[in-house]
Image (tube, rainbow, N blue to C red):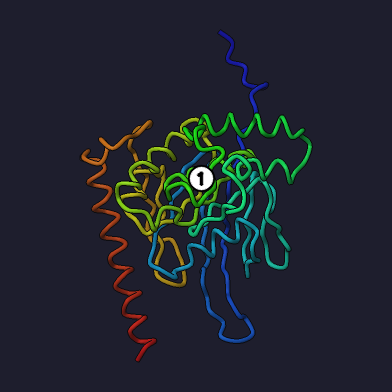
Amino acid sequence: MSTDKTNEPEARGCISIRNVSKVYDPDGAKVLAVDNCSMDIKAGEFCVVVGPSGCGKTTLLNAIAGFHEITSGEILLDGQQLCAPGKKTLPGSDRIVVFQNGALFPWFTVLENVSFGPVVQGGLSDKDIRDKAREMLVQMGLANIENSYPSEISSGMRRRVEIARAMMNDPSVLLLDEPFRAMDALTKTVVHQFLLDVYDRSKKTIFFITHDLEEAIFLGSKVYIMTTRPAKIKTILDVDIPRPRDFRVLSSSTYIRLKKECLEAVHEEAIKAFTAGEREMA
C-alpha cells in the first residue's frame, strides 16, 4: 500500500498567537485586556478558552475574527499574518463566528439562512446553492424544518442552523463565543453532541469560548484557562479523552480528574475577579 501523501490536501486552520496584547483606549483609560498571550493551535484542534467574565477571552476571539486590531504581537493563520499592530484585518469566510446571542435573519426561512453565505459570495447558481444547503441540513438533522422561520423553531435548533450556515462557507476556523450559554441543561446535552458530530465529520479548527467547565472538558481537545483581566494563560489542560465522545465520558475517571483540575484553577481566578470588582465599586 502506498504511503505517499503528496496529493493529500494541506490541513487548514493552524492558528499561532504570538505575544499578543490589547489595550483599549490607549490615549485615555488604558485598559489592558490581554497581556502577552501566546497560543499554538493545530489545524483541526478543538481549542476551548475559559476564564472569569471580562478577562479578555472575547477580545482574543475578536482579534482572530478580524473585528479589531491588537496593540502588540501578531496572529497568524496557516503561516500568514492575520493580525498585527496597525494592520487592518477584515473578517473573512475562512473565519466564521457563531455569536452568543444568535444572528439568524428572522425574515429568512431556515433554508434561506443557510444559503446566505454562498449567495453573497457568488460563483454558484441558485439551484446549486439550494442543493448544497439542503445537503447540509440533511447532515445536520434539520431537513424537516427548511421552510420554517427562526421564530418557529427551538433555541437548540436555531443554534444548529447557525452552525450549519457557518459550515456552508467551508471555513478554516469556526469561532464560537459562548454559543450555548443561555440554554437549559437538557438542550445543551443535545447541541453538545451535535457539535461533536460536526467536529468529528469535518475536523475543522474550533476556537470555543465558554464559562462552563463541564462543557469545556466534554468538547475540547485542549482547554486554556485564563487569568482575570488582563488575560494571560494560567494553565493548559490536555483533554486526553478519546474521540468520538458521548455522555458516558462524563462519569469517567479522566473526566472527573480534569474537571477537578480545571475547577481549582478557575476558582482562584474567580476570587481575584470578584475582589477586583468589589474594589472598583468601593
Q: Is label 1 in a helix, a strand or a loop?
A: strand
Compared across the picture, whether 275 is left or right of 176 comes to left
Q: Quadrant of residue 219?
A: top left
**Residue at 72 percent of width and 42 percent of height:** 119
Disc 1 designates what residue? 206
Compared across the picture, whether 240 is left or right of 30 comes to left
- In this rendering, the answer to whether 176 lies above or below 20 is above
**Residue at 54 percent of width and 65 percent of height:** 59
Residue 42 at x, y percent in the picture: 53, 42
Compared across the picture, whether 189 is left or right of 78 comes to left
Q: Quadrant of residue 74?
A: bottom right
Front-lying residue, 235 or 117: 117
Of the 4 image quadrants, the one containing the C terminus is: bottom left
Count neighbours of disc 1 (C-alpha within 10 A) and say few if under 14, some if 14 to 19, many if 20 or more: many
Of the 4 image quadrants, the one containing the N terminus is: top right
Front-lying residue, 176 or 30: 176
Residue 278 at x, y percent in the picture: 33, 84
Residue 167 at x, y percent in the picture: 58, 40
- In this rendering, the answer to whether 36 lies above or below 46 is below
Front-lying residue, 55 or 240: 55
**Residue at 52 percent of width and 29 percent of height:** 138
User: In the rendered picture of this protein, how many numbered marks are placed on residues?
Assistant: 1
Amino acid type, label 1: Ile
- In this rendering, the answer to whether 243 lies above or below 262 is above
